[in-house]
Image (cartoon, rainbow, N blue to C red):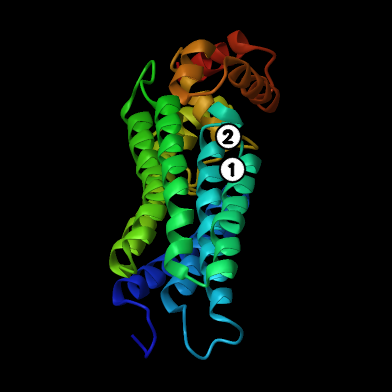
Amino acid sequence: MFGTSIHWTTFFYLLLDTVIVLFTLYYSTRKDSSGYKRFLSLGILFITYNLTGGFLPIKNFPGPLILQYIITYGVAIALCVYIVYYLYKEYDIIVLKYNSSIRNLAILSSGSFIILFLIPYFFTYSLDSSRLLFTIPISILAFVFLGMFYERISHPNNPNEYILRRNRLSMISVTSIALLPILTLIGDFQWLTFTVMNTAFYAISIIEIDRHLYFLENKTKMYEVFAMSKEQAIHSADTKIIYENLTRREIEITLSILSNLSYKQIAKDLFIAESTVSKHASNIYKKTGVKNRRQFINRYRKKSK
């Protein structure tokens, strides 16, 4: 298209991703935008990925050809690392097996690109051999990470549809990342590679939409927590959810506490440590003006009578 190497499917994803980011930006200006910053950053990275991967390489680009590959591969690596970072935040993960922290994953992926792609290229000037040398070990590592992530989020203790949907969508996103090195090795099939990668963005977008709908379904309960009457919750002219200063994770834990789940059960459902649940719960009690779980439950029950 347009006399460049971009495929029409890539251009379509570029437009769709831009619409999603612009809508999110508009929506975030009408509410507290703190919960949307990570998603906006992710969307901007996907737009950049579609632009660089779709339009490059081009003949009249200043500098050597390898510079264009450094840009496209660099953006792709940054995107993959950020998707993992996004999901780590989603599940409150600090590190998986084999010391797989975000920092170490970023160092491993960027270091592998330099050692296995750039250095061999400067000795051989062969893009094909450098690509082969880089993508095969990265593919193996990517599928090892996929297995570790699946092990971490599979088999929730008290599954509900909301948690199960989020887990499936998260696995779609990580699977897309794991497939990228293989797709790169297969060849320049933009329609396939960019479809798989943008699927990760749309899966995360559905996670965010599903979370919003889940909170809407429980808005009456949340209003009651903050000492608002049922009549106010139902007939309020302002339909936005008032969650005070609670984070999205704290809202999920609040709803679990109100469902009479123990901290241990909540930890298993959300795939986080019990101590993390306890820390979030302490913040919830502080923000809602109670001293402990019993006072919190009693306050809710009084408002629900």
Q: Residue at x 34, y 69 (%)?
A: 188
Q: Position of residue 25 (x, y in %)?
A: 54, 62
Q: Residue at x 52, y 91 (%)?
A: 60
Q: Answer with left or right where residue 32 lies relative to residue 54.
A: right
Image vertical order of residue 69 relative to residue 103, above or below? below
Label 2 crowd bin: few (<14), some (14–19), many (20+), radius 10 Å = some
Q: Position of residue 120 (x, y in %)?
A: 56, 62
> Viewer-proximal residue, 197 or 252?
197
Q: Residue at x 50, y 40 (%)?
A: 87
Residue lying furthest front: 124
Q: Position of residue 149 (x, y in %)?
A: 45, 32
Label 1 crowd bin: few (<14), some (14–19), many (20+), radius 10 Å = some
Q: Residue at x 57, y 19 (%)?
A: 273
Q: Secondary structure at mark 1?
A: helix
- Identify the mark at residue 100; answer none if there is no mark: 2
Image vertical order of residue 82 relative to residue 19, above or below? above
The C terminus sits in image quarter: top left
- Identify the mark at residue 179; answer none if there is no mark: none
Image vertical order of residue 29 relative to residue 158, above or below? below
Q: Earlier in the sequence, mark 1 or mark 2?
A: 2
Visible in this render: residue 244?
A: yes
Q: CA distance from mark 1 to mark 2?
A: 6 Å
Q: Secondary structure at mark 2?
A: loop
Q: Position of residue 265 (x, y in %)?
A: 46, 13
| Residue on which disc 1 sits | 105
Q: Disc 1, disc 2: CB below 8 Å?
A: yes
The N terminus sits in image quarter: bottom left
